Image (cartoon, rainbow, N blue to C red):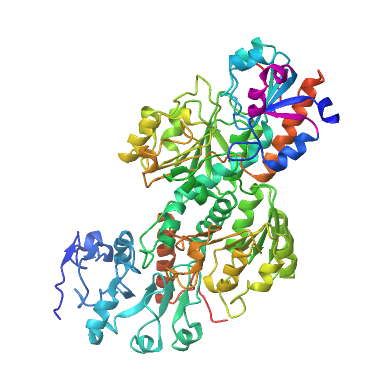
Amino acid sequence: MTQSLIFVQRKAIRAVGDDESSGCSVSLNTLTFVSTCSRPIMKGEELPGLLVNEIGGMHGILHDHVEFLKKHFCLITMKEFLENKKNMSKKVQAVYLWWHKPVIDKDLLQSLPNLKVIANSGVGMDHLDLKLVASFGVKMANAPCAVSSSTADTGMALLLASARRLVEGYHVAVSPGMEYCEADFLGVEVTGATLGIIGMGSIGYKIALRAKAFEMKILYHNRTRRKEQEEQAVGALYCEKIDDLLCQADFVMVVVSLTPQTHKLIGKREMELMKPTATLINISRGAVVDQEALVIALRSGVIRAAALDVTYPEPLPRDHPLLKLKNVIITPHLGIKTDKATRMITEEAVENILAALAGLPMPSEVHPS
Amino acid sequence: MEAQELPCVLIDCIGGKHGVYEDHAEFLKERFCLITMKEYLENKNFLGKKIRAIYMWYHKPVINEELLQSLPNLKIVASSGVGIDHLDLSLLSSYGVKVSNTPFIVSTDTADLGMALMLASSRRLVEGHQMAISPDTEYFPADWLGAEVSGATLGIIGMGTIGYKVAERAKAFEMKILYHNRKQRNKEEERAVGATYCKKIDDLLQQADFVMLVVNLTPQTHKLIGKRELQLMKPTAILINISRGLVVDQDALVEALQNKVIKAAALDVTYPEPLPRDHPLLKLKNVIITPHIGSATVKTRHLMKENMTESIQAGLAGLPIPNEVLL
């Protein structure tokens, strides 16, 4: 293992005292760390260490975000950390999770004595042991604001694509062997249909706002009922019993967090309550739906179709029956996969981390329930 | 026989890929004596005189002068859908034949499909689906991204009934809406959807993240979007066409997509339909094509059948014709 060289570019730094009259002081923003930060360049000027899984690759921080992160933090990848635990472990004050990595376990927490905060990209926290993290005195944050519009758009995209058989239609339009005729290729109407939203948090509510513009009748099921004005603004009717929603909806959209209570929330019983003409859309977590029951329901016409942005696992094994069904659209967890949303997520994470490190209230702190 | 008292209506065929749906045929047979093109051709002399209306389902049967000359008692042609660019209205008028279409019932379905294509294209839904089910996929790369619809700018070219419904839907996605139209809409209509009028199409093209075509096909809108217009668009912009294939210069579009002059396109309509199987548009990764399914829902097709039936019945009774198309 070799010590990486530190190359530091300084732009217009003046040490304190050099020019008393202008009152200049060292500006941290002008420091650019190009390589690892194995030792500080000046005493007292070290940026807080931020542990990330990797840069680029399967679960890595996006390359486009690196410059922004390096303005505030000294980035340490898991590889660098593992190669030099002795020196690195004390430097890490924060962890930024991207696509649930690095995995936070007891070993890691024990080896990071100065860890103050873990920021999660996205809103779901089901991959974290919140109690364990809290027991080490470490704060946690998610990124709710950045996520909601983008995920609501994904839900609507899947609803529309499934209803109008967009993916099937694409294959008819471009495939060499396909017999083609516009006249007998039919989908189901979205405008005026009934949408049942299971989980009316910020994402669910944004879906309701969008669906209202399609003149959809909106039913919702949630742990708690929303305020009357909120219901009226989107024309949503509360279904205290999930069964009432399932019996009436033409489209059932699942928008809950994954918790022990929502695990396999939609199973055989629930699907049998749905109309045979209904479509199930899942943008929450794969484990909220009983996948085996779903395969059976789709094959036997218990429900018309499904559109899944999430599965368990992701990706599904290549021989999984869901991949072969014509009435299923599966997307690769698109939820927040836009330039805009990912950028906002990183900005939100940085805000939370900086607040935690300064001992200030965090914009989106998550507590173990 | 009772059936012979019902007015005779010519259709292309029943069932199969192009014909009137079986369940629709049941409904029609209660009101009309249906004669298929095959039956007519086998017995032209006898049947020609009996036919008083044509039920034109998805542009079939094709109406030409020869046919018109052999149907001396033809009073009305009822055409499915809203587009009438496939009909020679002057020719029909010269034979004293009236024409009807089904304009308003297709509007919401077509607006819905426009939204579906915009969302699918910007979020790379079709590509994503292919990745999700491909036998070669081992993981989903973290840096595989699409573009956001919420908060983006939508430019609607053609703000008729369908265009306006698109605006209503887009507003809920907090989109900024620009529109270009022959005539400006009134202030309340604009305010209701937050739409800004662009008298010059160039202004719309330069600002829009999504450009949606929702015009009729007329001599003025033929190749409305060509090389010049595509070059005015942002390189990150997406073109969506739910109007008619001929509104876009397809060769220019292929070039623009190949050279990254625009980012992507989503087309429910092409010229011709379907495209030849070796057409470059079919091979481009940044193109979604759907087989003209703008109004393709079970419910809307039923409504079309009912509308067309009403129009035929009115036409044959000499009454004002609902949805009559005038020259």
Residue located 65% across and 10% down the image:
B94
Residue located 59% across and 21% down the image:
B87
Question: Could you say where residue B209 lies in the image, as x and y percent from the top left?
Answer: 44, 42
Q: Residue furthest top?
A: B94
Helix, strand or loop: magenta stretch: helix
Residue located 66% across and 50% down the image:
A212
Residue B322 visible, this angle: no
Q: Where B233 sits versus A150, above or below?
A: above
Q: Quadrant of the C terminus of chain B?
A: top right
Give the left or right position of residue A167, taking residue B1 as reference.
left
Q: Quadrant of the N terminus of chain B?
A: top right
Give the left or right position of residue B30, taking residue A75 as reference.
right
Q: Which residues are magenta?
A: B31-49
Residue located 58% across and 40% down the image:
B17
Q: Quadrant of residue A93?
A: bottom left
Query: Of residues B65 and A349, which is closer to you in this image?
Result: B65
